[in-house]
Image: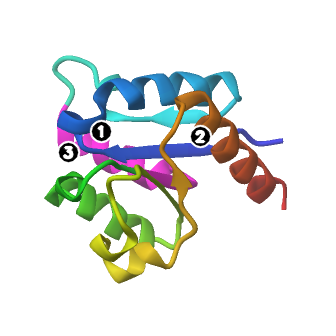
């Protein structure tokens, strides 16, 4: 079976540590993960971002507050939608569905709880999609 590839979109100022733990947990679930903390020193940011988005099977958007919808996160979500990639929002209790753009509200989201629990649910969904 092919290992699913996921791009993690998030607000660095809000969710850096949670996303690092989430990415590690996804990798333990045999999911190939791309997120910006893996960009090497000297690597061009835009090129790395573009490659990560292009090569991913899905985009996970981690959203903790209305300010998490930064221009970069909105762009990454737009690429997912435009590229017909699976989009999996992970939202905290602080963010109500009414605060989200319509295209994002149309997707079933996961609650932002423990990184390991969210990773297990994302990995399960991705592996079912890849196997289909």
Distance from label 1 to label 3 (Cα)?
5 Å
Give the residue number, with chain letter if any, for mark 3: 46
- Which residue occupies 17% across, 35% down? 13
Labels 1 and 3 touching (C-beta < 8 A): yes
Taking the spot 43% from the left edge, 54% from the top edge, the residue there is: 54
Q: Secondary structure at mark 3?
A: helix
Say which label, 2 or 1, has the lower sequence index. 1
* Residue at image location 50% in from the left, 29% down from the top: 23
Residue 45: horizontal and vertical position, in percent? Answer: 19, 37
Per the image, the residue denoted by label 2 is 118
Q: Position of residue 37 (x, y in %)?
A: 31, 25
Q: Is residue 123 above or below residue 89?
A: above
Q: Is residue 116 left or right of residue 17?
A: right
**On screen, residue 49 above or below 99:** above
Residue 37 as seen in the image, left or right of residue 115: left
Q: Nearer the viewer, mark 2 or mark 1?
A: 2
Residue 82, can we see it? Answer: no
For disc 3, the neighbor class at 10 Å (few under 14, some 14 to 19, many from 20) is few
Say which of marks 3 and 2 sits in front. 2
Quarter of the image where one finds residue 52: top left
- Assess disc 1: are there few (<14), some (14-19) or many (≥20) residues with their C-alpha within 10 Å of its C-alpha: some
Q: What segment is highlighted magenta in the picture?
A: 44-61
Q: Would you say 52 lies left or right of 13 here?
A: right
Q: Contact, CB < 8 Å: mark 3 with mark 2?
A: no
């Amino acid at each position: 079976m092919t290992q699913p590839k996921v791009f993690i979109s998030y607000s660095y100022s809000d969710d850096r540590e949670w996303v690092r733990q989430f990415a590690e947990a996804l990798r333990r679930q045999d999911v190939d993960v791309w997120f910006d903390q893996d960009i090497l020193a000297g690597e061009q940011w835009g090129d790395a971002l573009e490659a990560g988005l292009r090569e991913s099977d899905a985009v996970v958007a981690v959203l903790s507050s209305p300010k998490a919808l930064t221009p970069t996160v909105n762009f990454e979500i737009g690429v997912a939608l435009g590229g017909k990639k699976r989009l999996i929002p992970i939202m905290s209790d602080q963010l109500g569905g009414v605060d989200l753009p319509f295209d994002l509200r149309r997707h079933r989201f996961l609650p932002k709880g423990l990184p390991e629990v969210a990773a297990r649910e994302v990995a399960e969904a991705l592996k079912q999609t890849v196997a289909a």
